[in-house]
Image (cartoon, helix red, strand yellow):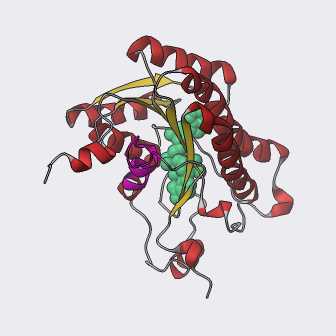
């Protein structure tokens, strides 16, 4: 039996991945996972220290990584990120749109500013990443692969997180539509929908009562660990294993969305 079967299937050697929001808990874990699978990783975000920290982890593991700054909500900034990546590495084969913010309040208390900030970071930024990187991937030999990050709240709205749930539902819809549009250009676009993984953006949202409710509604009765997203991301991003997967929505949620009563 050939020993390189898994590497041929899921390996990312010789490819360059950009992880926007690689400065965060889930994005950082995905960045490390892609690097372990052989990709050169651009850890992109607006938190220099966290970006450097993530790169250090990758370099210590023998991988290749560099931090590049980006404000994911600003077109010019995302265009600069693409330009800087190409200048540094000459190619970009994969993009993960993993920047995100959350906000929890009763419906009548949501300010316009909050609603717009959540939509700008979760939805508009995902669109900018898809459009700007997708355009480049559409004309390069070999195409490319984009992974957006949804949420279980894209499927079942979560109380108190109105703007967040709406933004994630829109991310799933946008993913399918862009996947349809870019398929002819050899660019695949998929969305990974995590369940509950304690991180910065949901620290305030996870109150004691809410944690109890979440765990009671999760068949596996626990939170996810960020490294548990890596396998699913590799499946969707990899050229061989994921070659016929586009427009797909993959839930990694301990059964949360499978549960009724
Ligand atoms: N943690 C969970 O349980 C969970 C569940 C479902 C979906 N998600 C999604 O996963 C993604 C990552 O979230 P996380 O949980 O790792 O949170 P996190 O707060 O640890 O990471 C989010 C990152 O996005 C960055 N960011 C925010 N606005 C940005 C901007 N304008 N430009 C560049 N970077 C920006 C932040 O600096 C941070 O590093 C988000 O889209 C989130 O909605 C998380």
* Camera-side residue of 215 and 236: 236
Instruction: Please tell me whether residue 92 is drawn above or below residue 24 in the rendered image.
Output: above
Apparent side of residue 133 relative to residue 34 in the rendered image (left or right): right
Residue 60, located in which quarter of the rendered image?
top left
Q: Is residue 180 magenta?
A: no
Q: At 53% across and 82% down in the image, what residue appears?
A: 216
Instruction: Please tell me whether residue 190 is drawn above or below residue 255 in the rendered image.
Output: above
Name the quarter where the C terminus is drawn. bottom right
* Camera-side residue of 162 and 245: 245
| Residue 126 seen | yes
Apparent side of residue 159 relative to residue 15 in the rendered image (left or right): right
Residue 220 x %, y % = 43, 77
Q: At 47% across and 60% down in the image, what residue appears?
A: 197
Q: How many marks?
A: 0
Q: At 73% across and 50% down in the image, what residue appears?
A: 170
Residue 66, located in which quarter of the rendered image?
top left
Q: At 69% across and 54% down in the image, what residue appears?
A: 164
Instruction: Please tell me whether residue 156 is drawn above or below residue 36 in the rendered image.
Output: below
């Amino acid at each position: 039996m050939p020993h390189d079967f898994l590497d041929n299937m899921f390996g990312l050697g010789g490819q360059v991945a950009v992880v926007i929001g690689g400065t965060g808990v889930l994005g950082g874990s995905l960045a490390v996972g892609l690097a372990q699978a052989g990709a050169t990783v651009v850890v992109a975000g607006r938190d220099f220290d966290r970006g450097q920290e993530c790169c250090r982890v990758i370099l210590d593991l023998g991988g290749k990584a560099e931090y590049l700054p980006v404000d994911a909500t600003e077109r010019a900034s995302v265009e600069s990120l693409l330009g800087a990546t190409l200048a540094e590495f000459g190619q970009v084969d994969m993009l993960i749109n993993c920047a995100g913010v959350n906000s929890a309040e009763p419906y009548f208390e949501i300010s316009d500013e909050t609603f717009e900030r959540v939509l700008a970071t979760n939805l508009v930024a995902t669109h900018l990443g898809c459009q700007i990187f997708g355009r480049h991937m559409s004309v390069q030999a070999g195409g490319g692969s984009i992974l957006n990050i949804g949420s279980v709240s894209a499927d079942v709205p979560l109380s108190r997180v109105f703007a967040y749930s709406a933004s994630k539902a829109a991310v799933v819809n946008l993913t399918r539509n862009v996947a349809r549009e870019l398929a002819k250009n050899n660019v695949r676009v998929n969305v990974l929908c995590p369940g509950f993984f304690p991180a910065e953006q949901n620290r305030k949202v996870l109150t004691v009562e809410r944690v109890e409710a979440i765990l009671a509604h999760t068949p596996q009765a626990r939170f996810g660990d960020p490294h548990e997203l890596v396998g699913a991301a590799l499946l969707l991003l990899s050229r061989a294993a994921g070659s016929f997967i586009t427009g797909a929505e993959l839930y990694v949620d301990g059964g949360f969305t499978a549960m009724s009563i």
